[in-house]
Image (cartoon, grey):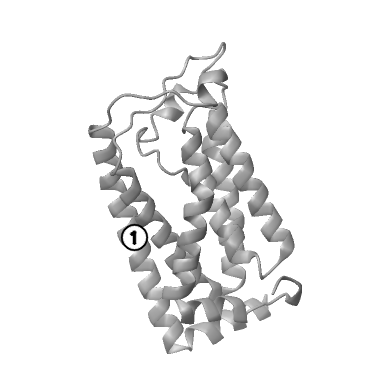
């Protein structure tokens, strides 16, 4: 406990860290606000659905509980990792803000309606679908977010890396089973997210150095 307190004292005595910490919080708040309005726009102008190579050939499964609550556990784990090493926070939150903004821009480009789903027997999770905007489809955040986390921790700890990779693949499967996303939303998430991570490492170099200076595993260098 004393070691953790010392980490925070050391971090917040660093003026550069404090400035970067404030900026990342403001950037994240701005990104969520931007995403809120672009998601409303995408839903308002959504047109018709299209056929899909996977969704057209599988039934809808009741995965709403996993869809809603599963990512919460991943986020709790991710936040715990950041809180354990405060100098990881600026790079992580700035990268996430960049992810949110780029995804929000993508959702406004093609006005594709959500894929229609047939309610399975015993289905009782329709209220959970009402929690989502519905037409902010491209690309899948459920798939992209854990993958971004995996890329961040690839050089830090291989266990964390594999946990997040598994979560990304798992939630990619979940959104297809529940017909929440088209196949292209899931497949493209990996490629776009990797590009976002590369941009983050280029644009937030100092924050990236702080992120990896806290703990580095030479096996993954």
Instruction: Tell me the quarter of the picture where residue 78 sits.
Output: bottom right
Q: Is residue 122 above or below residue 22?
A: above
Quadrant where the C terminus is found in the figure = bottom right
Which residue shows up at 37% across the image and 74% down it? 22
Quadrant of image for the N terminus: bottom right
The residue closer to the viewer here, 144 or 131, is 144
> Which residue occupies the foreground of this view, 182 or 118?
182
Q: Residue beneath label 1, please? A: 29
Q: Secondary structure at mark 1?
A: helix
Q: Residue shown at 42%/57% (left/top)?
A: 99
Camera-nearest residue between 37 and 52: 52
| x and y percentages locating residue 30 in the rendered image | 30, 60
- Left or right for 20, reference 178: left
Q: Position of residue 66 (x, y in %)?
A: 58, 34
What residue appears at the point 30 percent right and 42 percent down from the top-left corner?
39
Residue 76's place in the image compared with 28, above or below, is above
Q: Quadrant of residue 31?
A: bottom left
Residue 63, quarter of the rendered image: top right
In the rendering, at what x and y percent does residue 218 appear? Answer: 74, 77
- The answer to whether 129 is drawn above or below residue 79 in the figure is above
């Amino acid at each position: 406990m004393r070691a953790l307190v010392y980490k925070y004292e050391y971090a917040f005595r660093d003026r550069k860290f404090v400035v970067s910490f404030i900026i990342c919080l403001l950037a994240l708040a701005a990104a969520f606000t931007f995403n809120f309005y672009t998601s409303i726009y995408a839903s308002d102008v959504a047109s018709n659905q299209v056929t899909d190579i996977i969704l057209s050939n599988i039934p809808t499964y009741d995965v709403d509980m996993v869809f809603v609550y599963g990512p919460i556990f991943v986020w709790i784990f991710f936040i715990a990792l950041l809180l354990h090493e405060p100098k990881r926070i600026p790079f992580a939150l700035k990268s996430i803000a960049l992810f949110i903004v780029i995804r929000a821009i993508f959702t406004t480009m093609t006005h594709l309606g959500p894929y229609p789903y047939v309610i399975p027997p015993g289905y009782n999770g329709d209220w959970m679908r009402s929690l989502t905007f519905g037409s902010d489809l491209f690309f899948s955040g459920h798939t992209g977010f854990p993958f971004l986390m995996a890329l961040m921790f690839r050089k830090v700890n291989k266990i964390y890396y594999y946990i997040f990779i598994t979560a990304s693949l798992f939630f990619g499967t979940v959104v297809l089973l529940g017909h929440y996303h088209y196949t292209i939303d899931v497949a493209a998430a990996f490629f776009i997210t990797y590009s976002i991570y590369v941009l983050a490492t280029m644009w937030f170099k100092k924050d990236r150095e702080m992120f990896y200076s806290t703990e580095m595993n030479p096996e993954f260098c």
